[in-house]
């Protein structure tokens, strides 16, 4: 690994550690699937840790009123927007969790 690659890797690792300190749900979605969730977010959704969330379609977690917004077409529109959108996700026990997408 070159020096710049090491610096980039260290910065990315540090950034992920920082996200774990946040008490809000933080998730990263690519192509409609979760690729990252912090521990707080996993617990808010009823999971002990993020691992079971990774790879899930984000649409599976959406409240039925927001399922279209989290479809592949809806996610493409959200990615093009500036600002944030409030929506509801549903935890494993059926509780609703209001979140803002930005």
Image (cartoon, rainbow, N blue to C red):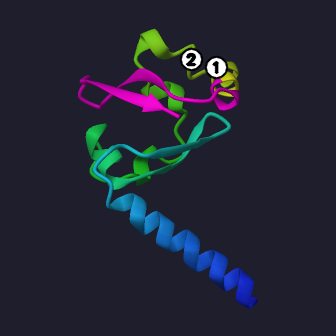
Please give the name of the residue rendered at 41% of the width and 58% of the height, measured from the top-left corner.
19
Q: Position of residue 67 (x, y in %)?
A: 51, 16
Q: Which residue is mark 1?
A: 74
Q: Is residue 32 above or below residue 42?
A: above
Of residues 41 and 83, which is closer to you in this image?
83
Please give the name of the residue rendered at 43% of the width and 22% of the height, measured from the top-left corner.
86
Q: Position of residue 27 (x, y in %)?
A: 47, 45
Of residues 44 and 16, which is closer to you in this image?
16
Distance (Cα) linking label 2 and label 1 = 4 Å
State the image quarter where residue 82 is shown: top right
Callout 1: SS: helix
Q: Which residue is mark 2?
A: 69
The answer, for residue 46, to whether it is visible in the render is no
Q: Position of residue 41 (x, y in %)?
A: 34, 45
- Circle 1 residues within 10 Å: few <14, some 14–19, many ≥20: some
In the rendered view of the protein, which quadrant contains the N terminus? bottom right
Is residue 1 found left or right of 30 in the rendered image? right
Q: Position of residue 64 (x, y in %)?
A: 43, 12
Q: Is residue 4 above or below residue 85?
A: below
Contact check, label 2 and label 1, Cβ < 8 Å = yes
Q: How many marks?
A: 2
- Circle 2 residues within 10 Å: few <14, some 14–19, many ≥20: some
């Amino acid at each position: 690994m070159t020096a710049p690659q090491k610096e980039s890797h260290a910065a990315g690792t540090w950034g992920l550690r920082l996200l774990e300190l946040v008490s809000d749900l933080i998730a990263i979605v690519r192509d409609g699937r979760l690729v990252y969730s912090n521990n707080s977010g996993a617990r808010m959704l009823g999971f002990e840790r993020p691992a079971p969330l990774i790879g899930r379609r984000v649409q599976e977690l959406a409240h039925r009123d927001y399922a279209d917004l989290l479809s592949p077409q809806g996610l493409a529109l959200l990615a093009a927007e500036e600002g944030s959108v409030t929506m509801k996700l549903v935890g494993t026990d059926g509780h609703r969790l209001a979140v803002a997408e930005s």
